Amino acid sequence: MIYKQPMFKNEELKDKVIVVTGGGSGLGESMTRYFLQLGAKVVITSRKLEKLNATAEKLRLETGGDVLTVACDVREYKAVENVLAETLDKFGKVDVLVNNAAGNFISPTERLSARAFDIIIDIVLKGSKNCTLAFGKHWIKTKQASATVLNIVTTYAWTGSAYVVPSATAKAGVLAMTRSLAVEWAKYGIRMNAIAPGPFPTKGAWDRLLPGELKEKFDIKKKVPLKRVGEHQELANLAAYLVSDYSAYVNGEVITIDGGEWLQGAGEFNMLEAVPQDLWDMLEMMIRSKKKD
């Protein structure tokens, strides 16, 4: 399947320095791998340095690329400033920020404590704000010619979703920040875009969201018109395009990559897909007969 293959082949990200928050696993790791394959230098961050170092060593062996690891809790602005300082010290510049760090869990909202709600808001919204503000201030102060921020959001950032209310609230804020700063900071050469992924299973996150038999009961593929989940390379391909110079005229955009999942749920009569063919034949005959009356 060609969609499982890399889209770019020829070091299209050569000489770019990219910071990926939450880069030690899951989609962050997949994007980092591809960025390295395309010639970028990448800084990955998360709270657990040991895990980051293990991922970085694996990616160095796979790609031969240059990876820097910096432990960072994105909820702390000073920790984010340290990531920026370490990046500049190592590579001399930074071209791209990918706000990928996130947290989520499924729960009826009335069961959540205020602290549980805050944890998700702080990681997703406050963390993205901290990183964007710190890096943006640096780019503006140094008058860097161009820079890019790529935020990873979700389709329920605009539809909302029950049972993941803290995440929906936070992602909606990140999307609003993306669109707002795309206008405000364009004059500084800073582009702001977002990706809204649908189901791209990752072991850690999906095991927490749908533990045990829940994964079998809620087969996510059934909700997707294409009847499959996403491949990590597909999202990495899109991310590479959006942080590359090929997308220089794309600004303030959120690109959905979900196989049509959110539209499947949005259409008022989409549930009619479950109607069998013989019943459609009966319905057609009934409609035709009424027209003759």
Image (cartoon, rainbow, N blue to C red):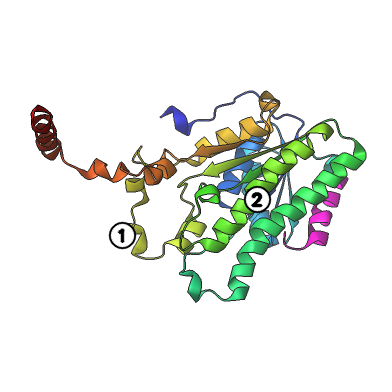
Picture quarter with the C terminus: top left
Residue 60: image location, x then y, percent: 66, 43
Residue 238 spot, x, y in % from top left: 57, 34
In the rendered picture of this protein, how many numbered marks are placed on residues? Answer: 2
Looking at the image, residue 5 lies above or below residue 105: above
**Badge 1: few (under 14), some or many (20 or more) residues near its Cα, within 10 Å?**
few
Badge 1 amino acid: Lys
Residue 217, which numbered label?
Answer: 1
Q: Is 38 or 103 nearer to us in this picture?
A: 103
Q: Position of residue 261 (x, y in %)?
A: 41, 43
Q: Who's the residue at 40% across and 45% down the image?
A: 266
* Amino acid at circle 2: Val
Residue 58 coordinates in the image, percent (x, y): 61, 48
Q: Which residue is more in the foreground, 39 or 132?
A: 132
Q: Which mark is residue 176?
A: none
Crowding at dot 2, Cα within 10 Å, few <14 / some 14-19 / many 20+, comes out as many
Quarter placement of the N terminus: top left
Dominant SS in magenta? helix
| Residue 124, magenta (yes or no) | no
- Residue 256: tell me if it is visible: yes
Q: Earlier in the sequence, mark 2 or mark 1?
A: 2
Q: In the image shown, does 50 or 72 lie closer to the viewer?
A: 72
The residue identified by callout 2 is 174
The stretch of residues the image draws in magenta is 74-89
Q: Secondary structure at mark 2?
A: helix
Front residue of 233/261: it is 261
Image quarter for residue 77? bottom right
Distance, label 2 to label 1, CA atoms, is: 31 Å
Q: Residue at x 35, y 63 (%)?
A: 214
Left or right relative to 213: residue 18: right
Q: Quadrant of residue 143?
A: top right
- Residue at 87% across, 44% down: 138
